[in-house]
Image (tube, helix red, strand yellow):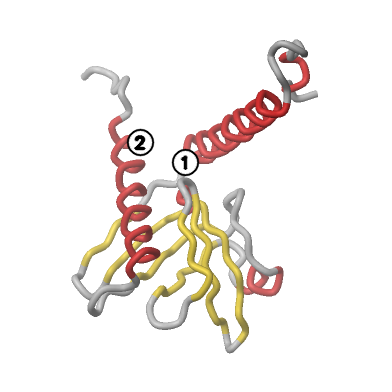
Amino acid sequence: MDKDHLNYPVMIDQAMRGVVRDVLRRVQTTGLPGNHHFYVSYSTLHPGVKMSEQLRAKYPSDITIVIQHQFWDFKVEDHQFHVTLSFGGVPEKLTVPFAALTAFADPSIKFGLQFQQSDMFELSSVFLDEVEESVSEISAVIESTSAEDKIISLDSFRKK
């Protein structure tokens, strides 16, 4: 049997994470339609997950959140989403990278997805964030200087 050089499982997993991102973007724009609501499970150990220390102590490795009636400050980005939820009456701001997801379910229509957890997703997410950051820095320098006046050295963008 030939080796899978295309790595179909990773491609499928990334596509499924894209489905979750697209669904959440719709909810951000139009709200939850009908009886739809979501259970979102993710690794709290994943880089980029942001939550209070009290909540992290209660859920040291993973957590499942419910996006249904009471959620605020909902913002979906390319690689993560932000939401404020109430835990025991205490509002908690969460940042969840899509690479941290372990499962997603919409019980109103009996739909669910499970995700692989691999180093590849962590590395790709970190790499993409670094590339975006570098592009932003380069764009800012280019916008703030005139090409006629200054020569831009690439050394200023290299990590030291």
User: Which label number is shown at residue 23?
Assistant: none
Q: How crowded is mark 2: few (under 14 residues within 10 Å), some or many (20 or more)?
A: some
| Residue 115 left/right relative to 50 | left
Instruction: Give the Cα distance between marks 2 and 1.
Output: 9 Å
Q: Mark 2 — residue?
A: 10
Say what amino acid the circle numbered 1 marks.
Answer: Ser
Q: Report x, y in % for residue 129.
A: 58, 37
Residue at horizontal 23 percent and vertical 75 percent from the top: 108
Q: Report x, y in % for residue 50.
A: 63, 60
Comparing 72 with 126, the one in front is: 72
Residue at horizontal 37 percent and vertical 58 percent from the top: 25
Q: Is mark 1 on a helix, strand or loop?
A: loop
Q: Mark 1 — residue?
A: 118
Q: Do the residues labelled 2 and 1 touch (CB within 8 Å)?
A: yes
Comparing 145 with 53, the one in front is: 145
Say what amino acid the circle numbered 2 marks.
Answer: Val
Q: Report x, y in % for residue 56.
A: 65, 68
